Image (tube, grey):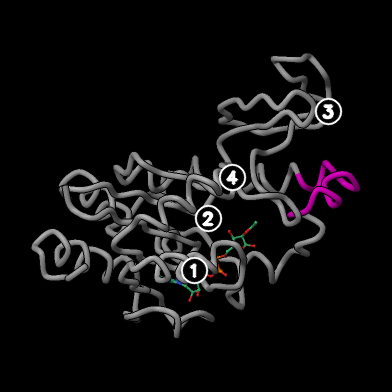
Amino acid sequence: MKGSIVILTGAGISAESGIETFRAADGLWANHRVDEVATPEGFAANPVLVQNFYNQRRGQLRDEAIQAHAAHYALGKLEREYQGVVTVVTQNIDNLHEAGGSRRIIHMHGELLKSLCSSCGRREPLEGDLTVDMSCPACGRTGTLRPDVVWFGEMPYRMDEIMELLEECALFISIGTSGHVYPAAGFVETAAAHGARTIEINLEPSRIRSRFDEHRQGKAGELVPVLVEEILQGHIRF
Ligand code: OAD
């Protein structure tokens, strides 16, 4: 069994699929106030606005033009063909890694295609829109359903498991994330401190570029398939 691989992904890996990133000049946070649509306080203040924001983004995933691309498929191939454990830890709430064939996926910021009941904690698969007058199928309360996404001020999911994977991995790869948001931005340091080789793929040097052993600059759709072939052919030492 070969050393395990952890791959952290961010909005940049979905950009070539047509989903906007957060911090680009025309990105999501240019058009919306973060505290309005991505905090528990924002949801309490205006649940309709917040539901509509995520309904719109969930609707995008039903758009046939939004498809997994070469980088997602390459990561699916890596998981199938590499003789060791490969885990994708994604900050993305879309389902493009699933579409690309990855199976070991940790959605640390949650998933658009799930609802969460803030009263009883039940999670349910969700295809359509969420509205404030819907009732939870488990506890029956009305107005308690929210998108199962992690907002600012909330704890990302499965952190204990992620920390263990980072401490054990031999190779850590970060793809398409700007390094602005913690704890994800600190993963490279944890992995490196425990001896992992670290590689970043990003369109521009991220905020945390200097913490990686290697930085490859360009589009995920072009660079990820190349890196995956190098790993599968044993050309990357770790
Ligand atoms: P950002 O929008 O901050 O960063 C996306 C990064 O991807 C940028 O550094 C881009 O240069 C890069 N990029 C763009 N297109 C690319 C491409 N085709 N190939 C490779 N890289 C590309 O998004 P994240 O880092 O994912 O959290 O943001 C992290 C978190 O901040 C999100 O999960 C979200 C947001 O606020 C919450 O909502 C809790």
Residues in magenta, as a range:
38-50
Q: CA distance from mark 1 to mark 3?
A: 34 Å
Q: Amino acid at mark 1?
A: Thr
Residue 173, magenta (yes or no): no
Residue designated by label 2: 91
Residue depicted at 35% across the width and 49% down the height: 87
Quickly name the residue at label 1: 177
Callout 1 secondary element? loop
Image quadrant occupied by the C terminus: bottom left
Q: Is mark 1 within 8 Å of ligand 1?
A: yes
The yes-or-no answer for disc 2 within 8 Å of ligand 1 is: yes
**What's the distance in space between the residues labelled 4 and 1, CA to CA?**
18 Å
Res 237 label? none
- Amino acid type at circle 4 is Tyr
Using residue 137 as the reference point, say whether residue 92 is left or right of it: left
Of residue 186 and residue 72, the one placed in the foreground of this image is 186
Outermost left residue: 233
Q: Is residue 27 above or below residue 72?
A: below
Q: Are marks 3 and 4 in contact (CB under 8 Å)?
A: no
Spatial CA distance of label 3 from label 2 is 27 Å
* Residue to which mark 4 is pinned: 157
Mark 3 lies on residue: 143
Please tell me in which quadrant of the rendered image residue 17 appears. Answer: bottom left
**Disc 2 element:** loop
Would you call the spot at circle 4 few (<14 residues within 10 Å), some (14-19), or many (20 or more)?
A: some
Q: Earlier in the sequence, mark 1 or mark 3?
A: 3
State if disc 1 and disc 2 touch (CB < 8 Å): yes
